[in-house]
Image (cartoon, rainbow, N blue to C red):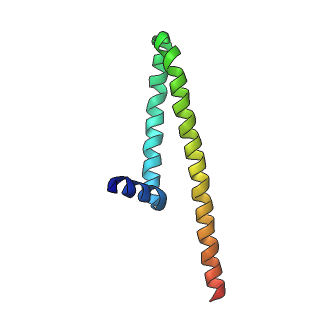
């Protein structure tokens, strides 16, 4: 449970770690493109079954990444606004 909490804290609060994570995900998806292409052309029977699951995973990742990026942007704006309000109040 402690490792999961550490992972979550890094994922939510450490922009440097977030950048590294998303960079690794970019590499993963770039390597995934040729693999999926090969399966599509050379194993069409397997692809007809696996493609539904593959589309599900890609869609879930896209939804997660988009929503998480929106939350990160709104948190950054909120923190900047609060810092500005503190400076103006001083």
User: Furthest-bottom residue in view?
Assistant: 90
Q: Nearer the viewer, residue 2 or 74?
A: 2
Could you tell me residue 38's position as x and y percent? 46, 18
Could you tell me residue 7's position as x and y percent? 39, 54
- Figure label count: 0
User: Furthest-front residue in view?
Assistant: 1
Could you tell me residue 53's position as x and y percent? 51, 25
Could you tell me residue 67's position as x and y percent? 60, 48
User: Furthest-left residue in view?
Assistant: 2
Position above or below: 34 against 71? above
Position above or below: 43 against 72? above
| Residue pictured at 46% horizontal, 53% vertical | 19
| Residue pictured at 47% horizontal, 47% vertical | 22
| Residue pictured at 45% horizontal, 61% vertical | 14
| Residue pictured at 51% horizontal, 32% vertical | 57
Left or right: where does residue 21 sit relative to residue 78? left
């Amino acid at each position: 449970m402690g490792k999961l909490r550490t992972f979550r804290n890094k994922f939510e609060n450490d922009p440097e770690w977030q950048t590294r994570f998303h960079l690794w995900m970019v590499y993963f998806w770039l390597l995934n493109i040729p693999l999926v292409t090969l399966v599509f052309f050379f194993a069409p029977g397997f692809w007809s079954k696996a493609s539904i699951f593959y589309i599900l995973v890609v869609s879930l990742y896209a939804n997660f990444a988009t929503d998480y990026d929106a939350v990160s942007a709104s948190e950054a704006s909120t923190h900047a606004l609060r810092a500005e309000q503190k400076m103006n109040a001083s």
